[in-house]
Amino acid sequence: MKNTLFLPILISLIISTSGFAKVRPAALFSDHMVLQQQSDVRIWGTADKSSKITINASWTTSPQTTQSDQNGKWSCTLKTPEAGGPYRIELSDGNEPTVLENVLIGEVWLCSGQSNMEMQMRGLIGQPVYGSQEAIATANPQRPIRLFRVKKIHSSTPRDTIGGGEWFCNTSEHVSTFSAAAYFFGSTLEKNLGVPVGLIDASWSGSPIQAFMDRETLSSFPFIKFSSIPDSLNKRPNKTPTLIYNGMIHPLQGLTVRGVIWYQGEANRKTPQYYQSLFTKMIAQWRKVLGNEKLPFYFVELAPTALDNANGETLPIFKEVQMKCMKEIPYTGMALTTDLGSEHFIHAPKKKEVGERLAYWALAKTYKQKYISFCGPIFKSCQLKQDTVIVSFDYAPRGLMPEKEDISGFEIAGADGVFHPAQARIMPASPKVMVYSPNVAKPQEIRYCFHNFCVGNLLFNTAGLPAASFRAKIK
């Protein structure tokens, strides 16, 4: 009797489960995702071992086929069209297909760094993001901006898959909890380009750059100390070399993106002597992981703050290193932040300006738009004329501002090396500033905003982008 009852139940279970979808794409590939336009895009996932898998994208009439390996892993390359959508993708091994709906084709950017990148649109407790209310209140799910947050996970060995996450549409709920700097960047791109924009945020607060690099790359730095603490016992994984890379970046290997934006450095600001080498090698490593040796990499200059002593020089010395990185690493650019600091907080609230300035670099350099100013004035040269220093700047083709006003932040020193505040005025209709101090008869050194926190009437080009801090010997 028992066997008689059991047999129909067993048959019913077999029938009911035989139609289950067995093809499982990686978390990066889900409903609402954005794929990079006009590219050979790799997608991947798992299935039963040695399964033949058919991938049918609605923008093409020719389905792709691939086969999972002995571990059930599979990957496939899809050729994407020009920006558009929505599309659907079906993945099947002969059973019930897995269907990805509402897929867009457009521009995809990876966004990473520490807390200033992670800082959500709604801000931190007691620390706002200016302009967030409007961005949250006007978020429209019909606007083709899509958001993906890589789950925070650390690992002592490289992982093949991220810990989780899903793509979200442009709703108030999801904009409010997404990276503010990244969102303002993507919003500016979408408005200008008129195509869907996908943003992938893989950031973690408090993290030094070493946490975002692999062990092989870091092995060339003798001062790096690798941890032997088991992952489950590590109380500070975000501060441990390689752990974020292994858990959140390595799983993106082969992902097709247009470029990377990066906001990090606070955790390395007190050891600037190492940062240029670390950053140079990290960019090269990420370009290899993402399969593009010319991948655009735009980053943010650390904003002024008085946390380390307003008159100290920790930040401007670190920013000198960041400037060298921009000048020496190909296909990079730096959003200047001289005017965006917060005296009492390391998390500057003006994330809208940060995101927009990153976007100006992308629009001008990646998307080749000729009429967009993308960088503030950068020191070019200086010369002494009698007792006045004439300072020339690059990236000020239409001159500097504010003209006919005293400019704050300049200091000059004589042979004794003691710096004195200087009077500074813009030479009319030029990219030059005249700097003079009655306390220095024979100027030998000059600097601008070379303190952790500067206030006053700062220097800009006519596009409203701020001049970078600098120091120089006077020739």
Image (cartoon, helix red, strand yellow):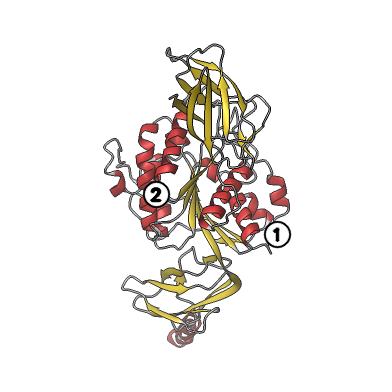
- Give, as a three-letter code, the residue at label 1: Asn
**173 vs 325: above or below:** below
Label 1: element kind = loop
How many marks overall?
2
> Can residue 227 be seen by looking at this rendering?
yes
| Percent of width and height locating residue 276 | 38, 39
Q: Residue 1 or 173: which is nearer the viewer? A: 173
Mark whose residue sits in front, 1 or 2: 2
The residue that mark 1 highlights is: 140
Q: Quadrant of the N terminus?
A: bottom left
- In the displayed structure, does residue 284 sit left or right of residue 343? left
* Quadrant in the rendering for residue 306: top right
Residue 330, given in percent of the width and then of the height, sits at 41, 49
Q: Residue at x 45, y 27 (%)?
A: 472
Is 171 situated above or below 20?
above
Q: Earlier in the sequence, mark 1 or mark 2?
A: 1
Cα separation, mark 1 vs mark 2, equals: 34 Å
Residue 117 placement (x, y as % from top left):
53, 45
Residue that lies at the very extreme toward the front in this rendered image: 386
The residue shown at (56%, 12%) is: 438
Query: Which residue in the structure is indicated by mark 2?
Result: 283
Seen in the image, is 343 located left or right of residue 45? Answer: right
Q: Residues within 10 Å of mark 2 (few under 14, many from 20)?
A: many
